[in-house]
Each structure stands twice: as C-alpha cells, then as structure tokens.
Amino acid sequence: MSREHVRQAIAALARPEPLCVAHRGASGHRLENTLEAFALAAHLNADMWEIDVHLTADGICVVSHDANLLKHAGVDVEIAQFTFDELRKYKLNNGEPVPSVREVIELAQRTGCGLYVELKAKGSGPKVVALLEAMRFDRAVLGSFDIAQVAELAEAACPYPLSVLVPVGADPFVLAEAAGADMIHLCWERASDAPHELLTDELMAEAGRRDLPIVAWHEEREREIAALRKLPILAICSDLPEMISGYRPRKDNPIEIVCHRGANTVAPENTLAGAALAYRMGAQRVELDVRTSSDGRLVVIHDDTLARTTNLDGPVANRTQEELTHCDAGSWFHARYAGEVVSELGDYLSLAKHRGGLFVEIKAAEVRRVMEEVAAHDAWTYCFFWCEDSAVIDRIQAGYPQARTMRRRQDFPSLDALLAAGKPYVIEYDYRIDDLSEFARARAAGARIMVRFFSEVPDDARALIALKPDMVNIDDPFVFSRAYDAWLQSEAGRTADTNTGTNTDA
C-alpha cells in the first residue's frame, strides 16, 4: 500500500465530518499515553489515537510525551538512559508501565483504531515505520515538530502519510514544503480565544491548492469544536474525544439518547461527571434516581444503601445531605473520579438547564418536594417523571398538570388500559417483551415513544433504530452511537442501490 493510497483512505474516513483523534488517548479521562487511555478512547469512538514516541537506551520505541518519567511516575528517570526492561520496572501513576509502541499497535489492531504518531526522539521514525510494516498496520500517520525527522522519512519513501506540526506564528506551507509532508497539523490551541478564525478562506484555499489536508489542534471548547466541525478539515484532536466523535442523529430519525444513570459505562453512575460526559457525547437526556437524606434533602443515588457506590455504608435515609455531599462516590469506579459525591437533584437541574433534559425516577421522595425543586429551577419543560409505584404517577398527574410523566407499557394489560390511566408524556417499551408495533397508536394518542434497550448487541440496536422510536433508554450510548452510524451507512447503501437500480434483496 502506497503512502498516497493510505492518505486517501484516511481522508475518505473523514467524510462528511472531521475525524476524531484522541490526543494521547482519552487523556481528559485517564492518564495520558497509557493503554487504559487508548482503550477508553476506542470505546468513546475515536477514529485515531495521537501517541508520542521516545526511544529507550536499547532502541525500543515507547509511548510517552515527556522524555522523563517525573511528571507521570514521580521518578526522575530519563527514558533514553534506561533499557526497555529497566524502564518497565517503574510504574506510572495509574499502575501501568510505560507502553511500547508494539503494545499500542496491538491494541489498535484489536479495537480498529488508527494511529497518529508524533515522533519525539531523533531516529524514532524509521523504527516506528519498521514496526508498523512488520505488524501489517496500515492506518497510521507519522509527524513531528522536527522538520528534519519528517524530511528523513519522506526521502526514504515512507509508505505512511507524513504530517508536519506547525507552531503558532509559523507558515504551515513553508514547513510542509521543507519537510515533504502530506498534511499540516496546526498546533494553534493557544493562539487566541477563537483559534478557528485563523483558518481563513485564504489559508483553506491554499491548503486545497497544495492538496494538504489540515489536522486541527487538541480542542475541548464546545464553541470552537462546533466551528471546526463545519470546516473541510481532515481531523480534530481532543483530550475529550466524545466531543468530536459524539452522537449526531439524522434529522429524519432524530432518536434521543437517554443515558441511564448517566454515561455509566465510562463514569460512575448517578454522578455529575457521568451526566456531563453523557451530554458531551450528544445524549439529549440523563436518567437519574432521587432519594431523600435524613434531613429531607433530595439526593441522587440508585440504591437505598450506600456501600456499593460510595465509601459510606448504611441506608441513604440515615445520612445527612452534608455527609452525602462530602463522601467519595467515584473511587469505586476509577481513581480518576475520587472527587465525585452524592449530589442533590438541584445540581442536576442546574446542569441540565443548558445541556439537555432529565428523566427523573422517584425512588424515595415526597412528590411535593420533587415538584417544588423542579418549579424552583423552572425545569418543567426539560424533565419527565416516573416511579415504580403507579400511585405516585397518579398523584403527579392529578396535582401537577404541568409535569410530564412516563408510564411503562409492561405495567398494563393493553395500550388502551395504559392511556385510560392518564395519558403520559412518554410511554416506555421494553424491546425484549413489549409489542413494538404499537408505536403509531401510542403517538396518535399524543405520547412520545421511549424504548428501554439495555443490550450491547449491534444488530439488535440497528433493528431498533430502523423502528424510529423517539427515545432510547440505554446504558452504553457509545455502542448505540456506533450502531446508529452503521444504520446510516446501510441506509446510504440502500439509497445508492435504489438510484442505480440494484436489487439488494436478490
């Protein structure tokens, strides 16, 4: 496979929007340049991982941004002065050793991700190329701030596309020509508060004339990401890859994702971190569970006891709000979330006001108190409510007509019986047990359709997507997002076959 062929293949992946390059892996969530950061980036649907390469004393390619381990392992160890075996004796702050490039390639092969390799150490380029070729890994780009390293690979007829990293103030086209690069990587995140404005029409036109795809800096600002995504560039880097790779449904099938207890497969359930991550990836709503503390405050936690998801024990109802908002509700999931606490319902209402909606399950709380809190935040339009005790839903519908409620189809012998109990805003169907052919009748009665879908089987998800429910209540939004993309591709294929007269059923 030629260098140009690889470049074109990678560029084709970027249509119609820029690729997501996880900067040092999912480094906003896990320790940068570690196997767990790369594995999480794959789960978050990143297309490629940006990795930094140094050489050990015996010439082994390893992945680390810094040349010294002091920052991420707490030891003053220069990578270039230790053999690979010696280096592996030191553990990074997450407990892993410094990964080899070989290990990262193996993980990329298993997860289907590409590699965007930044060459740090002189002489690392040819070694990385040899590894990639020996391991038959095709989807890779190699680049550096060091023009000489890129030029060396260009002169050696490197079979992989080459990128030149461009600092603020430098002319990208001068650097690209000097390096013999195939693309330009603009490292302009600190150039201004709105660096996308530096991608002028003139710059974009010149890049097009020279056939130089553009890779944008690592970006975590929502406004900047929104602006960059509209530009005809190859890729955007980010410490938070879910902001680039997130869920974006098509207008004719705008299924809303409702994240069950937040993004609970990648962050601790029922925490503000999990809710924020869900919104960042494109989920429209977060489901949460409300209970009452011993001093009458509304708190968000699923279980009636604390041991499973906090460092406390005993019933939730026996603890004060002060105790709950100072406990550790994140370390059980991952050390990165040690600062998470059991937050109040009001905190979620404030977060959701400008981010999305909430599906509030009332576990153990007075209806009056919940409604007062919602009213205080003027949150009627972005919340709906459910309780396993149907009498609670009855009280909400009778006493608070402005409140939106949900009913489960499985709790009634027929759709007519459900509607007779009081028309809800949402009817939830379980994809495993309920009659999904009722959607049209339920919609005709004024209800929105939500499907409870706790499966991670892509084929099941694609079949559900084809039914076009209004919402899905799911544990893993990233699996569903991948399935939605697969559904889009299949629909595009059907359209193409229809336009060409091909019979796909033959």
Image (cartoon, rainbow, N blue to C red):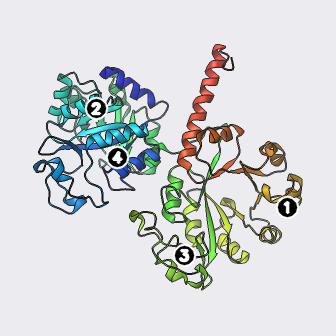
Left or right relative to 391: residue 313: left
> Mark 1 or 3, which is nearer the eye?
3
Specify few, some or many for label 1: CA neighbours under 10 Å numbering under 14, 14-19, or 20 or more.
some
Amino acid of disc 4: His
| Image spot of residue 203 (x, y percent) | 33, 31
Q: How crowded is mark 2: few (under 14 residues within 10 Å), some or many (20 or more)?
A: many
Residue 93 is left or right of residue 482, and the answer is left
Quadrant assignment for the C terminus: top right
Q: Name the residue under label 4.
A: 23
Residue 85 in view of the camera? yes
Which residue is nearer to you in this view: 376 or 282? 282
Mark 4 → mark 3, Cα distance in angstroms: 36 Å
Helix, strand or loop at label 3? It is loop
Amino acid carrying mark 3 in the image: Leu
Task: Return the residue nearer the eye: 238 or 317.
Answer: 317
Q: Residue at x 13, y 48 (%)?
A: 83
Q: Residues within 10 Å of mark 4 (few under 14, many from 20)?
A: many
- Image quarter for residue 182? top left
Q: Where is residue 246 in the image (x, y as percent from the top left)?
A: 51, 45
Q: Residue 306 bears which disc, if any?
A: 3
**Which numbered mark, 2 or 4, is in the foreground of this view?**
2
Cα distance between the residues tagged 1 and 3: 35 Å
Vertical comparison of 124 with 428: above or below: above
Q: Name the residue under label 2.
A: 132
Mark 2: which secondary structure?
Answer: helix
Residue 422 tag number: 1
Which type of secondary structure does the marked residue at label 4 adopt? strand
Amino acid type at circle 2 is Leu
